[in-house]
Image: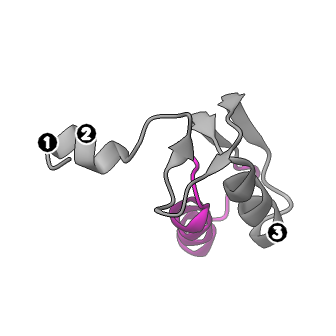
């Protein structure tokens, strides 16, 4: 998922730093407009492929209506 875009932008930056790929695409299942905007601002050359763009982030940075926090769900901490 692409929520705030911070981790996605960092991941793309890391891949660019360690490799010289001819092309990179960011692929996710769901995104928030804020994350799309941040990733595009940091890496305008990277296309974003997503199944859905939900309406917004809440104050905690969770995608609405979306998934909540995937890490919490994965590790049962929510």
Is residue 7 part of the magenta span, yes or no? yes
Q: Which mark is residue 52?
A: none
Instruction: Give how far across and how far down residue 57 sits, in percent.
Output: 60, 53
Q: In the rendered view, would you say 57 is above or below 43?
A: above
| Residue at the image position 49 percent from the left and 51 percent from the top | 62
Q: Give the number of marks.
A: 3
| Residue at the image position 61 percent from the left and 71 percent from the top | 13
Instruction: Give how far across and how far down residue 38 sits, in percent.
Output: 73, 65
Q: How packed is label 3: few (under 14 Cα within 10 Å), some, or many (20 or more)?
A: few
Of residues 27 and 67, the one nearer the viewer is: 67
Kindly report the distance in space between the C-alpha atoms of the residues bearing marks 2 and 3: 29 Å
Callout 1: SS: loop
Q: Which mark is residue 41?
A: 3
Colour convention of the picture: one colour
In the image, taking residue 18 as reference, residue 50 lies left or right, namely right
Q: Which is closer to the viewer, label 2 or label 3?
A: 2
Instruction: Give how far across and how far down residue 35 sits, in percent.
Output: 67, 56
| Residue at the image position 56 percent from the left and 68 percent from the top | 6
Residue located beneath label 2 in the image? 73
Kindly report the distance in space between the C-alpha atoms of the residues bearing marks 1 and 3: 33 Å
Q: In the rendered view, would you say 35 is above or below 72?
A: below
Q: Which is closer to the viewer, label 1 or label 3?
A: 1
Q: Are marks 2 and 1 in contact (CB under 8 Å)?
A: yes
Q: Looking at this rendering, what residue extends furthest in the left direction?
A: 76
Is residue 12 part of the magenta span, yes or no? yes
Q: Which tag, 2 or 3, sits closer to the chain's start?
A: 3
Q: Which residues are magenta?
A: 1-24
Callout 2: SS: helix
Residue located beneath label 1 in the image? 76
Q: Looking at this rendering, what residue extends furthest in the top direction?
A: 51
């Amino acid at each position: 998922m692409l929520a705030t875009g911070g981790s996605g932008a960092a991941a793309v930056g890391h891949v660019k730093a360690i490799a010289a790929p001819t092309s990179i695409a960011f692929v996710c299942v769901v995104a928030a407009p804020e994350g799309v905007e941040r990733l595009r601002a940091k890496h305008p050359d990277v296309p974003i492929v997503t199944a859905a763009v939900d309406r917004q982030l809440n104050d905690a940075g969770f995608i609405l209506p979306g998934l909540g926090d995937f890490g919490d769900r994965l590790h049962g901490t929510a």
